[in-house]
Image (cartoon, helix red, strand yellow):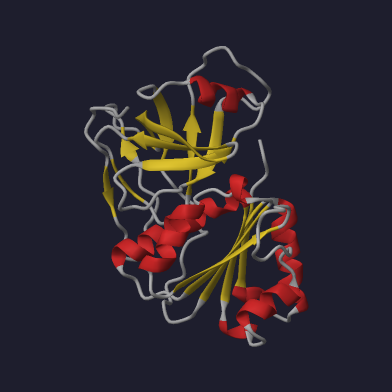
């Protein structure tokens, strides 16, 4: 079921975009805005994809940035409260803003599960520096574990929609196919983006006949070759995956300036 409210208007950034703010009727700058839940969809076992209509507000953001969401109180409380930040999983071209999250037993997640499409929430302007490099000539390697795929889905959709000349290899690690968010879409993107290569590994899936190793130094070299200095690596996912990938790249003598990492803790 979709909301009948006009879609938010998104401005695609040509390069770097500074955080924008909204001015209230009293003339005071504020970064929050009202939004309405537009859609909720399970995109993997235990993973919910939520999109929001911004009710006509304009917002500019870069793929890879994050935003805060505050949910209304429907009776679930804990010490963490009802405000969280998430990486934007949608593209600036999608006309909605959204996130995907693993569902846990927190007050925020219980509330999110219960709220129907059409519920109004508060969202804040996207921000953050984990974004695509300006240099499109240098090949990129995305390393994602679990829900870390969200930032890279946003980036890849934007690359496709803008026909940007990035060359990207995505190493995507999960336990099994059932828990792999956006798997079918990523396979479609591999067919649609000429410079995109998808490398999957399922570490605990007995029925999977592909790669099953965890991401380590040898794994990276097997798929990318010995000359790793030519790549810029962007790493996102749970702390164990991110820390393991960083150790693997350090052992492969990849310079620190060629690695950008972001960890996501579950909550």
Question: Which residue: 52% across, 13% down?
Answer: 74
Q: Which residue lies furthest to the bottom in this view?
A: 227
Which image quadrant for residue 117?
top left
Q: Can residue 143 be seen in this view?
A: yes
Q: Where is residue 86 in the image (x, y as percent from the top left)?
A: 53, 42
114 versus 183 height, above or below: above
Question: Which residue: 37% across, 58% down?
Answer: 17
Quadrant holding the N terminus: top left
Q: Where is residue 237 in the image (x, y as percent from the top left)?
A: 64, 53
219 versus 44 height, above or below: below
Which image quadrant for residue 190?
bottom left
- Foreground residue, 20 or 132? 132
- Foreground residue, 222 or 83? 222
Q: Where is residue 105 in the image (x, y as percent from the top left)?
A: 67, 26
Q: Position of residue 7 (x, y in %)?
A: 25, 37
Question: Which residue: 27% across, 39% down?
Answer: 8
- Foreground residue, 228 or 27? 228
Q: Can residue 255 be seen in this view?
A: no
Task: Tell whether 138 sits left or right of 3.
Answer: right
């Amino acid at each position: 079921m979709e909301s009948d409210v006009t879609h938010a208007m998104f401005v695609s950034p040509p390069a770097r975009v500074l955080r924008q703010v909204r001015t209230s009727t009293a003339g005071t700058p504020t970064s929050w805005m009202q939004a309405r839940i537009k859609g909720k969809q399970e995109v993997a076992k235990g993973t919910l994809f939520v999109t929001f209509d911004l009710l006509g507000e304009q917002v500019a953001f870069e793929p890879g940035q994050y935003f805060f969401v505050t949910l209304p109180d429907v009776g679930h409380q804990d010490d963490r409260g009802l405000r969280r930040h998430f990486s934007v999983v949608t593209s600036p071209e999608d006309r909605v803003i959204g996130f995907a999250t693993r569902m846990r037993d927190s007050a925020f997640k219980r509330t999110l599960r219960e709220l129907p499409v059409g519920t109004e929430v508060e969202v804040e302007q996207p921000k953050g520096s984990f974004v695509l490099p300006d240099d499109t000539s240098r090949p990129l390697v995305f390393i994602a574990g679990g829900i870390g795929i969200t930032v890279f889905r946003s980036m890849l959709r934007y690359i496709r929609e803008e026909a940007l000349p990035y060359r990207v290899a995505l190493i995507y690690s999960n336990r099994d196919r059932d828990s792999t968010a956006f798997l079918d879409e990523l396979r479609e993107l591999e067919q649609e983006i000429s410079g995109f290569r998808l490398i999957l590994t399922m570490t605990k899936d007995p029925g999977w006949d592909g790669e099953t190793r965890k991401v380590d130094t040898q794994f990276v070299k097997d798929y990318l070759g010995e000359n790793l200095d030519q790549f810029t690596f962007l790493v996102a996912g749970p702390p164990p995956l991110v820390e393991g990938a960083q150790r693997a790249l350090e052992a492969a003598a990849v310079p620190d300036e060629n690695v950008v990492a972001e960890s996501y803790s579950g909550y």
